[in-house]
Amino acid sequence: MSEISVASRIEVLQAKQELSHTKKGLLSGVISGALWGLDGVILGMALAMAPFSGGSSLYAGPLAGAAMHDGFAGFWLFLYNLFTGRWREYGRTLVTKPGMIVCLASLFGGPIAMSGYMLGINMAGASYALAITAMYPAVGAILAVFLLKEKITPRVWLGIILCIAGAIIVGYTPPEGDFPQFYLGLGLALLATFGWGMEGVLSTFGMDMVDPDIAIGIREAASFVVYLIGVLPIAAGLIVFWDAFKEQSLYYVALAGLMGGLSYLLWYRALNMTGVGRAMALNITYALWAVFFGWLLTDLELTANLIGGAVVITVGTLLVVANPKELVQLRNK
Amino acid sequence: MKLPMRFRILHLLSEGISLSTAEIIANLQSEYAGEGQFKESIMNLHLSSMRAVGLIEIIELSLDAVGALQQKYKITEFGRSRLSYLPSSWQKSGSKVAV
């Protein structure tokens, strides 16, 4: 082979390998959104059953369900890491600073954001709380630009905004009811938005040096432990939690945990491989997938705002995933 | 105590020499052999991700005897700054790098 043909073959092979890596990351993000939508539908079915539909406080059932979901997700992920020969990395990673940063990310994304989300819906109504929390990809992307020096082009920003707008349209319900603690509810919804944004940035920072498959295993396990020790006792959720082991809904939560674990696994890989801005925009496409799976598995009716929102999300997603070559270097030096 | 895999790769590359995937595997064989994660496909995934975030860079590309792409990686300044996250015992230690 001549020197020129060797050089051009090297160039072609290198470009192919780089593109393969970035495409895997984008595909992981898209599938993570789909699985999160399916997870939400299955978890919703479980939460409508005993014992989650009861409980001595309004939040006991949903929080116990969220705790069990993360517990099952952590368990399935541990099995996955056991069978792929990574299990020793748990202990090695937990004694490092990046490992502790992943634990901190799990606090923001798990108990803090999820509790803020539920309280926000209760105090300010679903219309406002869902619209505010749907903005977490923008918060994550802004934090990533400043904290991680992530490169986000104007086209990707537009894609992120469209994905958020689509999620708001899909989740929109006309405001109704009386909310005496309305502004506190808005504040808690904002806390949830910030929590999910921070989770993405902190975990991505940690995953520079931590295997994403281990990072998400730690994230789910840490979230479960904090729910069990710090959140459920306050929300009177421990009784619901233990009662669930005697009910059929346990199988639904276990299945939702499997879908959630897989979704998070792929989402953390996407965060590591494509950056916070893109991965979060792809993750929020769950709103689109939740409509599809809700229509398929439950009696959800397709309305004009569901279809309109789905179209907007699809356009946003296409803008986010276009030109994977941008992902060869994720950050400004 | 052994380091998590990515930490160990970064530490290995901090010892002043550029290495290919095969050379990194050869250097870490004695420490991680027998672990299911210790294989070329996972090693390549780590290296691609570490490169995308700027911890390491490619400084040499070539073709091997069968025409497959060979890349040599080197730690960047940003990667060196992250060595501060290594446990203190690893920050001082050095190991012999085989090429």
Image: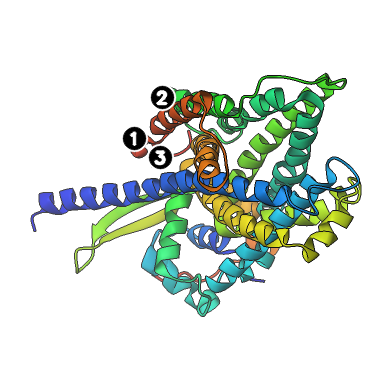
Mark 3: which amino acid?
Answer: Leu
Q: Nearer the viewer, residue A187 or A274?
A: A187
Q: Is residue B77 visible?
A: no
Cα separation between marks 1 and 2:
10 Å
Which residue was labeled with disc 3? A327
Q: Position of residue B45 (x, y in %)?
A: 43, 58
Q: Nearer the viewer, residue A207 or A278?
A: A278
Q: Are marks 3 and 2 on the same chain?
A: yes
Q: Chain of mark 3?
A: A
- Foreground mark, 3 or 1, reads 1
Mark 2: which amino acid?
Answer: Arg
Q: Chain of mark 1?
A: A
Which residue was labeled with disc 2? A155
Q: Give the side of residue A15 with respect to residue A182, left or right.
A: left
Cα separation between marks 3 and 2:
14 Å
Q: Give the side of residue B74 with respect to residue A183, left or right.
A: left
Which residue was labeled with disc 1? A323
Q: Nearer the viewer, residue B24 or A264?
A: A264
